[in-house]
Image (cartoon, rainbow, N blue to C red):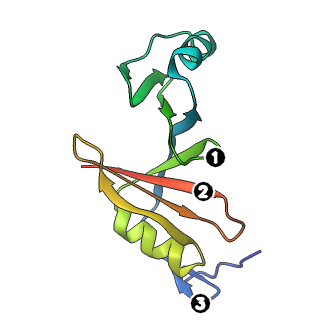
Amino acid sequence: MAVMDLNNHVQGVTMTSSTTLGIKTVLHPVTDLEKAKPVYTALLGVEPMADAPYYVGYEAEGQQIGLVPNSDMTSPVAYWHVADIEAKLAEVTAAGGRLKDSPRDVGGGRLVASFADPDGNVLGVIQDR
């Protein structure tokens, strides 16, 4: 376990004040949107706010739950919302994370990226502009 000193250093990695805004988005890979939609609608108790062949999204209790068909994801990915995606990626890669997907604009000024922790767990970051 890393030990943090009062100068915001973790084992030689300088941390910035770039904190997260919490996990607000979780994307789930699905093979069949038409079969998955009723299950997630029943679970969340709301109809999708976005319903397209490439993505179905729900807004439930302040969280965004997305269904992504035919993706390379092998399990759900939690996305941490951040104010500065580049700064956060620099911090996590300096700390030992491995960049998986570079930041890309997915529409509406939203940038998304993902990285893997040292055990290969995939984590995502989102920046809304």
Residue type at tag 2: Val
Q: Is residue 23 visible?
A: yes
Callout 3 amino acid: Gly
Q: How many marks?
A: 3
Q: Mark 2–mark 3 contact, CB under 8 Å? A: no
User: 6 or 58, which is in the foreground?
Assistant: 58
Secondary structure of the residue carrying numbered label 3 = loop
Residue holding disc 2: 122
Disc 2 secondary structure class: strand
- Residue on which disc 1 sits: 74
Give the Cα separation between the discs numbered 2 and 3: 24 Å
SS for tag 1?
A: loop
Q: In whole angstroms, how far apart are the C-alphas of marks 1 and 2?
A: 10 Å
List x then y, in percent, for residue 28: 57, 35
Residue 103 locus on image (x, y percent): 35, 60
Point out the frontmost of discs 3 and 1: 1
Instruction: Specify few, some or many for label 1: CA neighbours under 10 Å numbering under 14, 14-19, or 20 or more.
Output: few
What kind of residue is marked 1?
Thr
Q: Which mark is residue 114?
A: none
Say which label, 2 or 3, has the lower sequence index: 3
Q: Which residue is mark 3?
A: 12
The label nearer to you, 1 versus 2, is: 1
- x, y (%) of residue 44? 58, 16
Is the residue 100 above or below the residue 94 in the image? above
